[in-house]
Image (cartoon, rainbow, N blue to C red):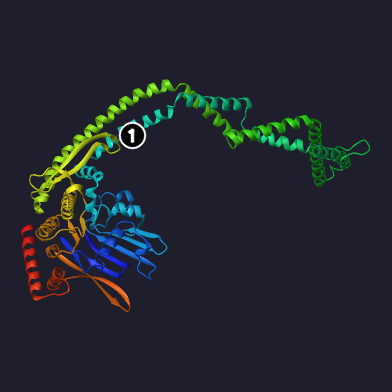
């Protein structure tokens, strides 16, 4: 149950705390006073879509919190998002909306996302807006309503699994099917590409080696000159010795005194190691100088290969490895095309089985839906009688269609508004008032199947008046004995029937518009009902009539307890 709704800087509401009560809560007020803003605030704290325009002018943020009681820790959406109510069943949802568009959401102090807030909020409170009745005109929604009532999720999931298997096979077959001319063109293209790549004899990693060799060949003269200089410095020439010879002379000079002290012995040893290292270096430089064979023909061959790789990479991939991967794909595709007829034959057999399984699962889903439809028809018919629509007949019609993601059924809600008339689609014959009451009946029946503890009705009385309005009020009172009901209304019958009555009042202070929500006592309720009934001119007769309306509503409520 929703205990307290706290609102800060939402449109014309600077700050408000609304303490709702169990049972039937009604909100009334002048048009434009801000009743819809209270509903918008509820929607925001439940994770609904918002915009920065919702923030009160001059404020840098808006804030809404909703405190719920009696929340079960097993409620769907809580544990999966790491949220748990307090030990006493209290759950506090909060949402802060910044002027920069950022949202901060929390559940019992734990940070959560807007999506998580929406998941949790949807299990606690259900808002039925004044335009929801129009959904009844959309026959695409009728099947969804029936599935919710009949709890056919298991049958629907089983059907959808078979349907997805069937569609996957169809998609695979479509990818293999092409006309002969297209097939011939594709085969020629694949064979050309495969031949070009195979003739290139690509080797993984060769590009790096090729680039290194090309760089070396392009700098051959510099390379040889450097090696020759290093060789001369290390090994010397005909006229003078190099570094190795000089180190050998130094080593021989110290050899006679190396035993005189440890320091001289260490010095000799270091000189010996240095001479050996220099000798090894000289040999390496000489080998590289001897091995290097600069050939203009080799450079031309390397350049030609590099150019070939460049052209192949422009066509088939950014690297040699990617070109080789493309080659394998081409081979696989060519093989698939050349064996397509055999593959299609195998898939055709699988598809026949999948279609059969899909139709069987669809038939099981249809059977479950038809069983649920009989029960829903009966329940709706009962609800409509209680809403003063006893002559209205309600029926659910089933038609067939090709398998689709939601089944093989075309489901339509039909009604006959008057005795002796044929059943027809609701969209073609229902008036605004009839739509409102049928939607109320449907919402009431669906609510019995759900764990949601609070139902919000935002001006669902549109198009309803007189005796029908009284029946809607009585129905909401009945519902409020099982669920908490919050109702925004313009009808005195509904407002009088409420256990708790709030007035949304707009005023002005220092040039700014302010809205506040006030809980009314009996005298103020009489005045508000008189205003709703007679407008701005409230007479004693209207006040007396309002008192009688309150007495009658109280007497009716006592029959429900």
**Disc 1: which residue:** 164
Which residue is depicted at the point 55% across and 31% down? Answer: 326
Q: Locate the C terminus by quadrant.
A: bottom left
Residue 68 at x, y percent in the picture: 24, 59
Q: Which of 385 and 326 lies nearest the eye of the viewer?
A: 385
Q: Is residue 448 visible?
A: no
Residue at x-position 75% and y-position 31%:
300
181 is higher (above) or lower (below) than 422: above
Tell me where residue 46 appears, x and y as whole percent. 29, 57
Report whether 400 appears left or right of 329: left
Residue 298 picture quarter: top right
Task: Note whether 237 is above or below 509 in the view shown.
Answer: above
Residue furthest to the bottom in view is 510
Q: Residue at x 25, y 50 (%)?
A: 75
Question: In which quarter of the view is residue 377 placed?
Answer: top left
Relative side of 350 to 378, left or right: right
Instruction: Using the rendered image of the protein, determine whether residue 506 is visible from the camera's viewpoint.
Output: yes
Say if 30 sits above or below 94 in the image. below
- The x, y position of residue 57, in whole percent, is 36, 70
Say whether residue 15 is left or right of residue 379. right
Name the residue nearer the viewer: 165 or 171: 171
User: How crowded is the residue under tag 1: few (<14 C-alpha within 10 Å), some, or many (20+)?
Assistant: some
Under circle 1, the secondary element is helix
Number of marks in the image?
1
Image quadrant where one finds the N terminus: bottom left
Question: Furthest residue to the right?
Answer: 239
> Which of 140/72 is in front?
140
- Name the side, left or right, on which 362 lies relative to 288: left
């Amino acid at each position: 149950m929703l205990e307290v709704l706290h609102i800060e800087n939402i449109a014309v509401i600077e700050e408000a705390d609304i303490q709702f009560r169990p049972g039937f809560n009604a909100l009334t007020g002048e048009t434009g006073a801000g009743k819809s803003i209270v509903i918008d605030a509820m929607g925001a704290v439940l994770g609904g879509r918002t915009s920065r325009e919702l923030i009160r002018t001059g404020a840098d943020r808006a804030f809404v919190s909703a405190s719920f009681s009696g929340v079960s820790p097993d409620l769907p959406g809580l544990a999966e998002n790491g949220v748990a109510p307090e030990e006493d069943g209290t759950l506090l949802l909060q949402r802060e909306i910044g002027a920069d568009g950022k949202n901060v959401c929390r559940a019992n102090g734990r940070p959560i996302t807007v999506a998580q807030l929406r998941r949790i909020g949807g299990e606690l409170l259900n808002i039925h807006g004044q335009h929801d009745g129009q959904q009844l005109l959309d026959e695409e929604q009728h099947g969804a309503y029936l599935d919710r009532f009949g709890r056919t999720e298991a049958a629907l999931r089983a059907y959808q699994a078979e349907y997805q298997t069937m569609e996957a096979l169809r998609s695979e077959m479509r990818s293999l099917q092409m006309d002969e001319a297209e097939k011939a063109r594709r085969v020629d293209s694949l064979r050309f590409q495969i031949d070009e790549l195979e003739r290139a004899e690509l080797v993984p990693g060769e590009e790096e080696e090729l680039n290194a060799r090309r760089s070396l060949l392009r700098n051959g003269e510099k390379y040889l000159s450097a090696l020759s200089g290093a060789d001369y410095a290390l090994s010397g020439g005909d006229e003078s010795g190099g570094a190795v010879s000089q180190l050998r002379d130094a080593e021989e000079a110290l050899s006679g005194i190396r035993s005189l002290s440890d320091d001289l012995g260490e010095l000799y040893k270091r000189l010996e190691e240095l001479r050996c290292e220099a000798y090894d270096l000289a040999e390496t430089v000489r080998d590289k100088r001897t091995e290097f064979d600069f050939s203009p023909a080799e450079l031309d061959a390397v350049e030609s290969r590099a150019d070939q790789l460049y052209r192949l990479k422009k066509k088939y991939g950014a690297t040699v490895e990617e070109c080789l991967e493309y080659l394998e794909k081409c081979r696989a595709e060519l093989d698939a095309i050349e064996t397509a007829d055999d593959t299609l034959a195998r898939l055709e057999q699988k598809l026949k089985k999948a279609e059969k399984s899909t139709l069987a699962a669809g038939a099981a889903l249809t059977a479950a839906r038809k069983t649920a439809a009989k029960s829903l028809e009966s329940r709706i018919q009962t609800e409509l009688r209680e809403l003063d629509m006893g002559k209205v007949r309600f029926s659910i019609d089933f038609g067939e269609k090709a398998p689709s993601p939601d089944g093989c059924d075309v489901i339509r809600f039909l009604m006959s508004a008057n005795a002796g008339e044929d059943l027809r689609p609701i969209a073609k014959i229902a008036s605004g008032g009839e739509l409102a009451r049928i939607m109320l009946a449907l919402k009431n029946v669906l609510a019995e199947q759900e764990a949601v503890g609070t139902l919000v009705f935002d001006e669902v009385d549109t198009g309803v008046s007189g005796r029908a309005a009284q029946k809607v009020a009585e129905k909401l009172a009945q519902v409020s004995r099982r669920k908490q009901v919050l109702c925004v209304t313009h009808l005195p019958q509904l407002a009088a029937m409420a256990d708790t009555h709030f007035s949304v009042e707009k005023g002005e202070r220092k040039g700014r518009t302010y809205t506040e929500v006030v809980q009314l006592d009996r005298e103020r309720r009489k005045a508000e009902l008189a205003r709703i009934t007679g407008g701005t001119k409230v007479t004693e007769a209207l006040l007396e009539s309002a008192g009688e309306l309150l007495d009658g509503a109280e007497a009716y409520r006592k029959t429900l307890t």
